[in-house]
């Protein structure tokens, strides 16, 4: 069974990146208010979230249950696709 805090962390990082990329959700309003959607900064915010998720995957490799690993892999894949090949570390 996935650890609720782990799921929350992955979802939070993914939502931050998606909000920076312009997805409309509750996080978008917060990100705009915090200045994270300014031109140039939005992509940087999304890339930072992707880097954190990638680091989390590397550091937890072999220690996650299937559902946690699947959630994390899905979040990373989704963000890499959204950011395209220009993302460092791709």
Image (cartoon, rainbow, N blue to C red):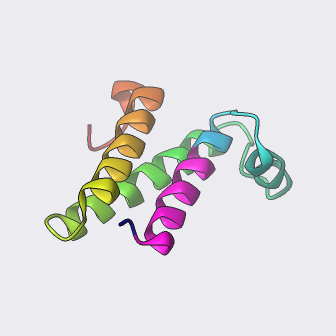
Q: Residue at x 53, y 49 (%)?
A: 14
Membership of 52 in magenta stretch:
no
Q: Residue at x 73, y 43 (%)?
A: 37
Residue 70 at what x, y percent from top left?
A: 31, 48
Left or right of residue 27: residue 7: left
Residue 29 at what x, y percent from top left?
A: 84, 48
Q: Residue at x 74, y 50 (%)?
A: 27
Q: Residue furthest left?
A: 62
Look at the picture and state if 11 lies above or below 78: below
Residue 63 at what x, y percent from top left?
A: 19, 71
Look at the picture and state if 81 lies above or below 19: above
Disc tally is 0
Return the residue nearer the eye: 67 or 89.
67
Magenta span main SS? helix
Residue 87 at what x, y percent from top left?
A: 37, 36
Look at the picture and state if 6 lies above or below 21: below
Left or right of residue 38: residue 21: left
Q: Residue at x 37, y 29 (%)?
A: 86
| Quadrant containing the C terminus in the rendered view | top left
Return the residue nearer the eye: 66 or 15.
66
| Quadrant containing the N terminus in the rendered view | bottom left
Instruction: Specify the segment rendered in magenta.
Output: 3-17
Identify the image quadrant of residue 60.
bottom left
Q: Residue furthest front?
A: 1
């Amino acid at each position: 069974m996935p650890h609720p805090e782990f799921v929350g962390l992955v979802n939070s990082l993914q939502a931050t990146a998606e909000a920076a990329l312009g997805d409309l959700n509750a996080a978008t309003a917060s990100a705009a208010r915090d200045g994270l959607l300014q031109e140039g900064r939005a992509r940087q915010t999304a890339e930072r979230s992707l880097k954190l998720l990638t680091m989390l995957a590397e550091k937890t490799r072999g220690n996650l249950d299937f559902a946690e690993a699947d959630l994390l892999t899905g979040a990373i894949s989704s963000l890499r696709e959204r950011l395209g090949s220009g993302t460092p570390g791709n």
